[in-house]
Amino acid sequence: MGYPESILAQGERVVLHHHPHWKCLLGPTLIFVLGTALAGAAGGYLETSDLGSSTKTTLGIIIAVLWAGVVLWFFVRPFISWRTTHFVLTDRRVTYRNGIITRSGIDIPVQRINSVEFRHGLVDRILRTGTLIIESASEDPLEFNDIPQVERVHSLLYHEVFDTADGDDFRGRR
């Protein structure tokens, strides 16, 4: 599902649109590979066993159903969740949308942002990702994890906040 351009206001410009960093898919991909290897090994063992043909068929179906369940729950579901999560910075707001069946989202007007910071450890620095922390008029700061190129996003957001604070909001409209 793409980002719904229809939620943008007239004249609103998208500065940046990201899904979470691909590192979120490393665990599910590893589970997929291991689950497939285990199912293949179990199927191979089953074929070489001395069991009856109906027993082999029943156990083969059980292995296939277990493999499909693992793939759907631990690989397909996280992939669809990753694909349907959007972090969008426009010239007027920060928008975060996520969810597959039940969608949720938050919009933070740029003019209400008090501070922007980022955090990333060694692995995140190598992968060029991190956590973006936005403090706005709300009580608690909002943390957005696994933002790709978090330093660039931090800089772009800071510049949008600075431009808005200087009265440059809604550029091109008079």
Image (tube, rainbow, N blue to C red):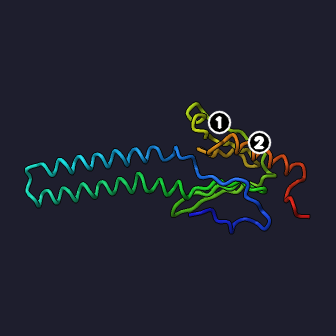
Front residue of 70/136: it is 70
The disc labelled 2 sits on which kind of residue? Ser
Residue 25 x %, y % = 48, 47
List the single residue furthest toward the right.
Answer: 174
- Amino acid on which disc 1 is placed: Arg
Residue 94 percent across, percent down from the top left: 71, 53
Depth check, front residue: 153 or 116: 153
Structural distance between the alpha carbons of marks 2 and 1: 14 Å
Q: Which residue is mark 1?
A: 119
Write the residue at 7% across / 50% down: 50
Q: Residues within 10 Å of mark 2 (few under 14, many from 20)?
A: few
Q: Is residue 4 left or right of residue 66?
A: right
Q: Position of residue 86 (x, y in %)?
A: 61, 56
Residue in the image at 73% along x and 44% along y: 135
In the rendered structure, find residue 115 and report the number of the disc placed on it: 2
Say which residue appears at 37% left-offset and 54% top-offset: 71
Give how far across and how far down residue 29 sits, in percent: 42, 47
